[in-house]
């Protein structure tokens, strides 16, 4: 009983240390974010989509809000690999040696998928949505006066979620390795997952069919990839457990 209590206390102490490391790295990343925010904001104001609009600050605090928003988002992006590594380091003692190496490789894959998701949303979806909104305004003969805070808030709300949504294959692969989900379960709940992804796509995009399809189809494709990835991970996990069981006999 005492050993169990000490083991729990040791786990809590280790978790506390890892959380402190994440917090410290996040504060350092915030400083880096403040340094990078200005050139990024200036660059985004000179893109083709932004040049067609007149960006204005309707409140004195708008430029500061935009600056802070970018600084914290940059800090979170820089900190996310550290968060994933600390999470891996915390649960890795409960994994087999081979599983430790495999799950550790998920971190760079996750970071790459996050950047791919943001890139897809920014270079493909965002220009399409801006053009759609501009066409609607012109058809209604409305002169748009855009606030800089609202513009960048809309940009971030459209792009950043895609970075997280593109993590789906990695998350499924990780959960499969831990035995939390199986490919059979994912295939069984496919229709419900499709419905959830359709709802997510409807929230992200404007009320227009083509833009909705541009979001939903990649999400459905990602879910199918996740099932394939889960099957591969499940087979490898079962094979490795059988090898470990045979080796212990």
Image (tube, rainbow, N blue to C red):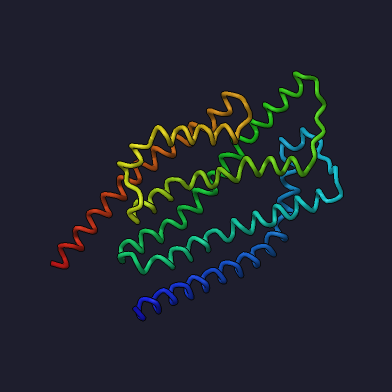
Single out the residue that lies furthest toward the bottom.
2
Q: Position of residue 52 (x, y in %)?
A: 77, 32
Q: Is residue 215 left or right of residue 225?
A: right
**Residue at the image position 30 percent from the left and 41 percent from the top:** 184
**Residue at the image position 48 percent from the left and 36 percent from the top:** 196
Q: Nearer the viewer, residue 157 or 196?
A: 196
Q: Position of residue 182 (x, y in %)?
A: 32, 46
Asked if 139 appears above or below 5 in the picture, the reply is above
Quadrant where the N terminus lies? bottom left
- Number of numbered tags placed on the structure image: 0
**Residue at the image position 53 percent from the left and 49 percent from the top:** 114
Quadrant where the C terminus lies? bottom left
Q: Is residue 138 left or right of residue 14?
A: right
Single out the residue that lies furthest toward the front.
1
Asked if 12 appears above or below 33 in the picture, the reply is below
**Residue at the image position 72 percent from the left and 55 percent from the top:** 37
- In which quarter of the view is residue 6 placed? bottom left
């Amino acid at each position: 009983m005492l050993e169990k209590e000490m083991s729990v206390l040791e786990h809590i102490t280790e978790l506390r240390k890892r959380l402190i490391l994440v917090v410290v790295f996040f504060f350092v990343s915030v400083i880096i974010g403040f340094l990078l925010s200005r050139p990024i904001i200036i660059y985004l104001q000179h893109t083709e989509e932004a040049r067609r609009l007149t960006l204005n600050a309707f409140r004195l605090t708008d430029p500061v809000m935009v600056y802070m928003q970018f600084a914290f988002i940059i800090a979170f992006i820089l900190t996310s690999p550290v968060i994933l590594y600390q999470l891996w380091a915390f649960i890795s003692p409960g994994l087999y040696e081979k599983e430790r190496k495999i799950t550790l490789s998920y971190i760079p894959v996750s970071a790459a998928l996050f950047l791919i998701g943001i890139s897809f949303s920014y270079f493909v979806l965002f220009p399409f949505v801006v053009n759609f909104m501009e066409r609607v305004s012109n058809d209604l003969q409305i002169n748009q006066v855009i606030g800089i805070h609202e513009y960048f808030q809309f940009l971030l709300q459209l792009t950043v979620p895609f970075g997280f949504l593109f993590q789906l294959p990695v998350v499924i692969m990780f959960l499969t390795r831990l035995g939390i989900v199986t490919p059979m379960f994912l295939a069984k709940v496919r229709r419900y997952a499709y419905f959830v992804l359709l709802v997510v796509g409807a929230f992200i995009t404007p009320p227009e069919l083509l833009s909705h399809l541009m979001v939903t189809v990649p999400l459905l494709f990602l879910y199918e990839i996740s099932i394939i990835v889960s099957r591969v991970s499940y087979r490898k996990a079962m094979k490795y457990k059988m090898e470990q069981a045979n080796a212990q006999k």
